[in-house]
């Protein structure tokens, strides 16, 4: 996987580790039902001031519903939502310091691009000169200056999306809700806009809540990520923690690629754990402080880039090594993905950086090899 | 445009002949049902009244050849149009019709808008029923419904009795045979023509636009002014045309509900046609009426099209 350019250098920002830090946005046991259907299920979430928070999850898991409740378009069936300690119940959308970029853009068809962007500013009775200046800034930001006078129906999908983004940003709200803000943009424009959004968020000290289907986007932009499924948050952590220490199979599989080996805990001494895998007929060593008991069903999850392959069995303490056979190789340019068959009908993936040219690749199809990884490379999943 | 100079390739699917015929069809109908009758009316308006059947002359007779056409041509004159300008009755009838039609349209708009808005905002499953209710009056004769208003509006009618009973008034109001009754009749009769286009434009209004406006700090009443109303303008315009145009030439309602003060060109036309049997003059009245309506509407639509182009 190609790594993204790193955004502007960030301060150490971890208010969630500081118990004295007040919550900025707080969902407290929020449930939203549509008839019998539970769209958001007893969800609690705290977001801190100036945080860039990403919501990740499959289609229909309740991300938009969560945002709409914060913006004021839906009332929670039960539970409360607080902004800066104030209960938002009963406050209409137009009095919330929250702006939302709609998934469907919702651009006013009878207004030009610049009028769309100026709309919110005019509601605030901002002086005309300031409005013009701000609109210009926003047009510049989303690279739409030549389209200022066009109507929405004269724009492409990506251009519309950028107008919607500019319109929601124009008022510089305390909280900005972005529902898939960059989905319709091409890769290059998307990466540029990501960077600019991050800079803007930093400069204007806004709090962002963003929905995205692109996990790389979430990883690069967000301070923390919430992974949602069926109206619940499964894990809310920094991108690194989500990636390295997923707390469930769903999270592990949702973010990035991962190998999962099913088994049973066979030994536990402090954080030294052994997992017996029946398909391999072998005990695997893991170091992790986790609350499990011998006999529990569990799985070992390891990212493909943490699995090495070699002809010789690597020796040494703290290394798991199992024999396998190269089943398939997928060449991706910067890396190759090796599909290794480790048992009948069980393959795992190992990512190897292509440090040499393809023709000189030493390990190839059908080779018998050893697959190895460090004891602290994988995580045990019990859910 | 760069593409202008490129050779135009015909990539149309299907038979080009059929395509051509389909495109000409509306023109054909217009020709048959509008232009031909109009030419006949126009010709009559240039004729002179005569004691014959039909009651005007000259008649074009092709039997006499070119000589016949010449006599026919010489027989036509603008006299009727000149007469219309000389008698102030006609001018005031035109103006009064326009005035009544204008105010009826405005009233109908104000009555219809909330109804259409309510319909568009009501639950999806109710909407077909509500739509049905709006169209329901068309199932009975227009004439009978207008007559029914006599029963409601007359001095011992339903309305007066109700108001007396409620103690709102001490003596019956004279509504019937006044312009008020005409306004009521026109607004009542043409209300569905206002509601339907308004409903059509409000119904397809995307709800997320209203949410977006509110999100950007607009209180609901302002959302209405800045988003709902502008986006329903096509419906407003269509509805106003549909009410205004027939109301200008309305004859039945002023005849049945109006009084001696009510001056409407439709009624004048009827009198000329049937009481005075002056077909040529009646035709001239009709032609002028048509011009009064067609010219401003065409200009308006030009203007609209130009504005679209400008944006
Ligand atoms: N007004 C509504 N009435 C009934 N069900 C609704 C309504 N709005 C949303 N839902 C349901 O609630 C669930 C969550 O919807 P939501 O729009 O929040 O999903 P999402 O996570 O944003 O999905 P996507 O990624 O596809 O945008 C969906 O199953 C949807 O069908
Ligand atoms: Mg959504």
Image (cartoon, rainbow, N blue to C red):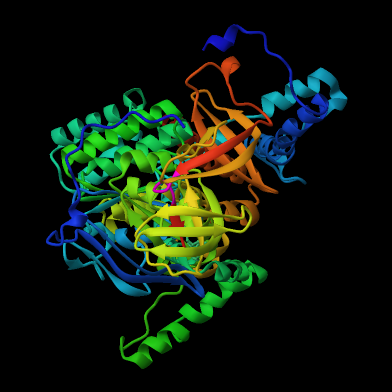
In the image, residue A121 sits, relative to residue A96, either above or below, namely above
Query: As drawn, is A343 to the left or to the right of A161?
Result: right
Q: Which residues are magenta?
A: A374-378
Q: In terms of depth relative to the viewer, which is nearer, A283 or A144?
A: A283
Q: In the drawing, does residue A209 fall left or right of residue B98?
A: left
Q: Is residue A376 magenta?
A: yes
Is residue B229 found left or right of A267 in the rendered image? Answer: left
| Residue A13 x/y as whole percent | 19, 46
- What secondary structure is the magenta-colored segment mainly? loop
Q: Residue drawn 15% across and 46% down?
A: A125
Furthest toward the top, the residue is B5
Position of the C terminus of chain B by quadrant: top left
Residue A47 location (% of width, % of height)? 25, 57
Query: With respect to residue A191, does B240 lie above or below?
Result: below
Which is more toward the observer, A353 or B174? A353
Residue B286 location in percent, x, y?
Answer: 58, 44
Q: Residue at x 57, y 11 (%)?
A: B3
The quadrant in which residue B72 appears is: top right
Q: Is residue A149 visible?
A: no
Q: Percent from the top left, x then y, of residue B149?
A: 52, 75
């Amino acid at each position: 996987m190609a790594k993204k350019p790193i955004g502007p250098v960030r301060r150490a920002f971890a208010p969630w580790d500081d118990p004295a830090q007040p919550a900025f946005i707080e969902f407290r046991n929020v449930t939203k039902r549509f008839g019998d259907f539970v769209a958001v299920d007893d969800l609690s979430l705290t977001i801190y001031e100036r945080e860039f928070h990403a919501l990740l999850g499959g289609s229909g898991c309740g991300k938009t519903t969560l945002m709409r409740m914060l913006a004021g378009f839906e009332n929670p069936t039960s539970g409360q939502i607080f902004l800066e300690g104030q209960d938002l119940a009963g406050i209409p959308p137009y009095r919330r310091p929250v702006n939302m970029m709609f998934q469907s853009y919702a651009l006013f068809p009878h207004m030009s691009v610049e009028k769309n962007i100026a709309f919110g500013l005019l509601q605030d009775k901002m002086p005309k000169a300031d409005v013009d200046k701000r609109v210009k800034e926003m047009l510049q930001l989303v690279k739409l200056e030549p389209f200022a006078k066009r109507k929405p129906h004269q724009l492409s999908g990506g251009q519309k999306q950028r107008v919607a983004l500019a319109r929601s940003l124009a008022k510089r709200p305390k909280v900005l809700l972005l529902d898939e803000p960059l989905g319709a943009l091409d890769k290059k424009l998307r990466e540029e806009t990501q960077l600019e959004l991050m800079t803007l968020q930093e400069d204007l000290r806004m709090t962002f809540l963003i929905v995205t289907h692109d996990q790389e986007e979430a990883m690069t932009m967000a301070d923390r990520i919430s992974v949602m499924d069926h109206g619940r948050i499964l894990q809310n952590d920094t991108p690194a923690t989500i990636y390295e220490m997923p707390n469930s199979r769903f999270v592990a599989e949702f973010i990035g690629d991962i190998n999962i080996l099913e088994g049973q805990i066979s030994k536990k001494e402090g954080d030294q754990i052994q997992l017996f895998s029946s398909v391999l007929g072998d005990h695997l060593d893991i170091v992790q402080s986790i609350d499990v008991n011998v006999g529990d069903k569990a799985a070992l999850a390891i990212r493909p880039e943490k699995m090495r392959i070699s002809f010789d069995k690597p020796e040494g303490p703290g290394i798991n090594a199992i024999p396998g056979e190269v089943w398939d190789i997928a060449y991706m340019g910067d890396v190759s993905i090796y599909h290794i068959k480790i048992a009948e009908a069980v393959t795992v993936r190992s990512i190897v950086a292509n440090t040499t040219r393809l023709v000189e690749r030493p390990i190839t199809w059908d080779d018998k090899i050893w697959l190895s990884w460090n004891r602290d490379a994988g995580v045990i999943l019990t859910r | 445009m760069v593409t202008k100079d490129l050779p135009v390739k015909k990539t149309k699917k299907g038979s080009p002949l059929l395509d051509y015929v389909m495109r000409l069809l509306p023109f054909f109908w217009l020709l048959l049902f509008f232009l031909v009758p109009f030419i006949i009316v126009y010709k009559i308006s240039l004729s002179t009244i005569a004691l014959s059947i039909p009651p005007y002359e000259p008649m074009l007779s092709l039997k006499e050849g070119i000589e016949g056409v010449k006599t026919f041509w010489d027989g036509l004159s603008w006299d009727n149009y000149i007469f219309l300008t000389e008698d102030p009755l006609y001018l005031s009838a035109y103006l009064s019709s326009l005035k009544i039609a204008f105010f009826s349209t405005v009233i109908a708009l104000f009555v219809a808008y909330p109804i259409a808005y309510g319909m568009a905002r009501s639950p999806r499953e109710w909407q077909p029923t509500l739509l049905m209710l709006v169209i329901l009056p068309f199932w009975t004769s227009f004439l009978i419904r207008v007559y029914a208003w006599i029963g409601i509006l007359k001095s011992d009618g339903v309305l007066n009795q109700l108001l007396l009973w409620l103690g709102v008034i001490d003596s019956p109001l004279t509504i019937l045979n006044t312009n008020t009754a005409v306004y009521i009749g026109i607004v009542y009769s043409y209300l569905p023509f206002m509601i339907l286009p308004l409903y059509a434009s409000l119904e397809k209004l995307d709800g997320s636009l209203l949410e977006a406006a509110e999100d950007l700090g607009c209180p609901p009443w302002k959302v209405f002014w800045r988003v709902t109303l502008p986006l329903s303008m096509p419906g407003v315009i269509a509805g106003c045309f549909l009410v205004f145009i027939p109301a200008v030439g309305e004859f039945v309602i002023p005849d049945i509900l109006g009084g001696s003060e009510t001056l409407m060109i439709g009624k004048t036309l009827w009198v000329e046609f049937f009481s005075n049997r002056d077909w040529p003059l009646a035709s001239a009245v009709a032609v002028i009426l048509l011009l009064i309506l067609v010219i401003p509407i065409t200009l308006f639509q030009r203007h609209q099209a130009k504005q679209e182009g400008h944006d």
